[in-house]
Image (cartoon, rainbow, N blue to C red):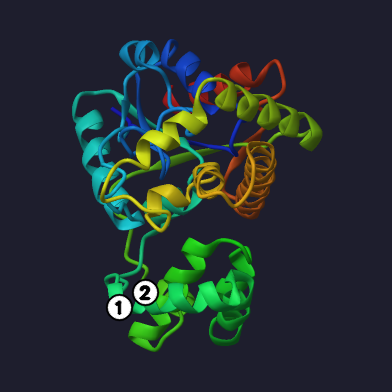
């Protein structure tokens, strides 16, 4: 018997990944593994566009709702959990379908992950205090001075990744980009078939993003964050609350701006996220690129799978 592949289906936010995955599962013996740094958290449902209970009952997704929002979840955690799920699915004679938009998770799984120093609360607190004083764009400029390669990849407002890159440098004295390059481990065992959903029309993708975000607000996104704020161990600095949308609503509830501005800021941040995801996807020449906005996308993916599986 030929070795079964592990199928990766990556794409930007609001590109229809879940709907495509569900349709593929109706045609092939696939089991879904979520590749999303926000879907791992319980209670974060509306703002993450988490599949509803009926959908998950019909098409189960692994690695959803496996952490409380107070807890951290790293790329290393994902690699460990995903490899366990992949082995379990393959052992059952079925095929893993990894679906999501957290590109670092995909890359860490398929290309390896460096051994990085553990988080240091004191270093993080110092960096947060400095950022509160000078702002994250200035912190990004500081990162550019010690690790220009990472700074080129990280957006000037991506506080979580800027903080982590500076933290690693403070602890180890070496840029995180160098540690990644030096610490790549051999990726053993699996054959990956990598598919990328790359919309051909940026305006149409933006329409989908706008419509989905409006639906989130209409269906209680702000109320969801209000409930999360009641959890004593959760703060605006928790990794889960730095997710797009949650960060902006938390600031709105802190009184920094009104609901309309919160929605506009969340929309801008979501569009920026999609832009970064697309840049990452287009940079990987090993991906089969498909337009999810085309009517025949399922047929196109099916043709690739039929060739690979038969």
Residue 137 is situated, as x and y percent measured from the top left of the image, at 63, 71
- Quadrant location of the N terminus in the rendered image: top left
Inspect this view and state whether residue 78 appears: yes
Q: Quadrant of residue 133?
A: bottom right
Who is closer to the viewer here, 85 or 139? 139
Who is closer to the viewer here, 153 or 272? 272
In the displayed structure, 274 sits above or below 2; it is below
Q: Which residue is mark 2?
A: 125
Label 2, secondary structure: give it: helix
Q: Is residue 233 left or right of residue 45?
A: left
Residue at figure coordinates x 24%, y 23% from the top left = 93
Q: Which residue is mark 1?
A: 122
Residue at figure coordinates x 61%, y 53% from the top left = 280
Q: Is residue 121 left or right of residue 279?
A: left
Residue 64 is situated, as x and y percent measured from the top left of the image, at 32, 32
Residue at figure coordinates x 41%, y 45% from the top left = 37
- Label 1: few (<14), some or many (≥20) within 10 Å? few
Q: Quadrant of residue 143?
A: bottom right
């Amino acid at each position: 018997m030929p070795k079964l592949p592990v199928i990766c289906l990556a794409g930007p936010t609001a590109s229809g990944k879940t709907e495509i995955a569900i349709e593929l599962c109706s045609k092939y013996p696939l089991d879904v593994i979520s590749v999303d740094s926000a879907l791992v958290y319980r209670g974060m449902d509306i703002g993450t566009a988490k599949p509803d209970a009926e959908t998950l009952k019909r098409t189960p997704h692994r690695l959803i709702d496996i952490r409380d929002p107070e807890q951290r979840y790293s790329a290393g955690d994902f690699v460990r959990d995903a490899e366990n799920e992949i082995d379990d699915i393959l052992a059952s004679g079925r095929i893993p379908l990894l679906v999501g938009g957290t590109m670092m998770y995909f890359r860490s799984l398929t290309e390896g992950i460096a051994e990085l120093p553990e988080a240091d609360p004191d270093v993080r607190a110092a960096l947060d205090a400095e950022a509160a004083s000078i702002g994250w764009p200035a912190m990004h400029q500081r990162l550019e001075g010690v690790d220009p390669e990472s700074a080129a990849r990280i957006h000037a407002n991506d506080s979580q990744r800027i903080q982590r890159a500076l933290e690693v440098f403070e602890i180890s004295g070496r840029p995180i980009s160098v540690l990644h390059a030096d610490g790549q481990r051999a990726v053993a065992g699996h054959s990956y078939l990598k598919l990328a959903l790359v919309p051909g029309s940026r305006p149409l993708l933006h329409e989908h993003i706008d419509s989905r975000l409006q639906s989130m607000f209409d269906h209680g996104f702000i109320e969801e964050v209000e409930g999360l704020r009641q959890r004593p161990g959760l703060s605006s600095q928790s990794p889960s609350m730095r997710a797009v949308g949650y960060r902006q609503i938390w600031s709105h509830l802190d009184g920094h701006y009104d609901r309309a501005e919160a929605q506009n800021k969340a929309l801008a941040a979501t569009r920026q996220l999609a832009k970064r995801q697309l840049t990452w996807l287009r940079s990987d020449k090993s991906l089969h690129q498909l337009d999810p906005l085309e009517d025949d996308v399922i047929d196109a993916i099916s043709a690739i799978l039929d060739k690979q599986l038969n």
